[in-house]
Image: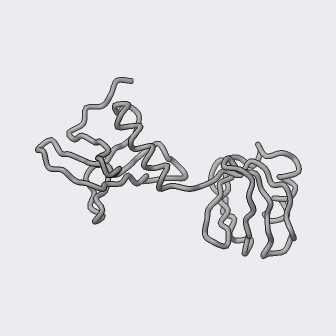
Amino acid sequence: MKPTSLNFSLIRNFSGQLLFTTAEGIAHTGIYPVRAFPISAPDNGLSLFTSNGHELAWLPSLDGLAAEIHTLIEAELALREFMPVIKRIKDVSSFATPSTWFIETNRGDTELVLKAEDHIRRLANNRLLVADRHSVYYMVQDIDHLDKHSRKLLDRFL
């Protein structure tokens, strides 16, 4: 796919902030990207906002952007978004809530405390969103791809 023609430029300034410059030469420092649908369609729809919350640009997709701009936006999103993916549930302290889950994620081993069963949300395509007591969200990409032991533990809460 060839790069999309943009009417702005985007670079990282010496302070490490994103610098957005319009075609007219108006510069905005400290802009940040926000996904429209971070869970259900993370690659579709993204806005670039000023630090005051004003939208500067809408990007229907990151596909087709120049490689430099795509890399800058992805790096900035990685700094702002934190949603570990649960790869395995090793153990749970109790099948009643609150319970402590000992899990393996794409960011390493950790534990989370599930305050209530309704802190597990079912999403489309066998996906789950699990919120811990600190409102950190963990994603289960596909229940069917979890190992047998993990599914057995998870089934007790669903």
Q: How is the image coloured?
A: one colour
Residue 64 location, x and y as percent?
A: 37, 31
In this view, the residue in front, 47 or 105, is 105
How many discs appear? 0
Is any atom of residue 126 visible in this view?
A: no
Residue with the most extreme top position: 2
In this view, the residue in front, 155 or 86, is 86
Residue at figure coordinates x 15%, y 41% from the top left: 23
Placement of the N terminus among the 4 image quadrants: top left
In the displayed structure, 128 sits above or below 13; it is below
Residue at figure coordinates x 69%, y 65% from the top left: 120
Residue at figure coordinates x 76%, y 51% from the top left: 104
Residue 60 location, x and y as percent?
A: 36, 43
In this view, the residue in front, 54 or 18, is 18
Is any atom of residue 64 visible in this view?
A: yes
- The quarter of the displayed image where residue 138 is located: bottom right
Residue with the most extreme front position: 14
Residue 52 located left or right of residue 73:
left
In the displayed structure, 92 sits above or below 48; it is below
Residue at figure coordinates x 49%, y 49% from the top left: 78
- The quarter of the displayed image where residue 114 is located: bottom right
Residue 3 location, x and y as percent?
A: 33, 28
Placement of the C terminus among the 4 image quadrants: bottom right
Residue with the most extreme left position: 24
Residue 69 location, x and y as percent?
A: 34, 37
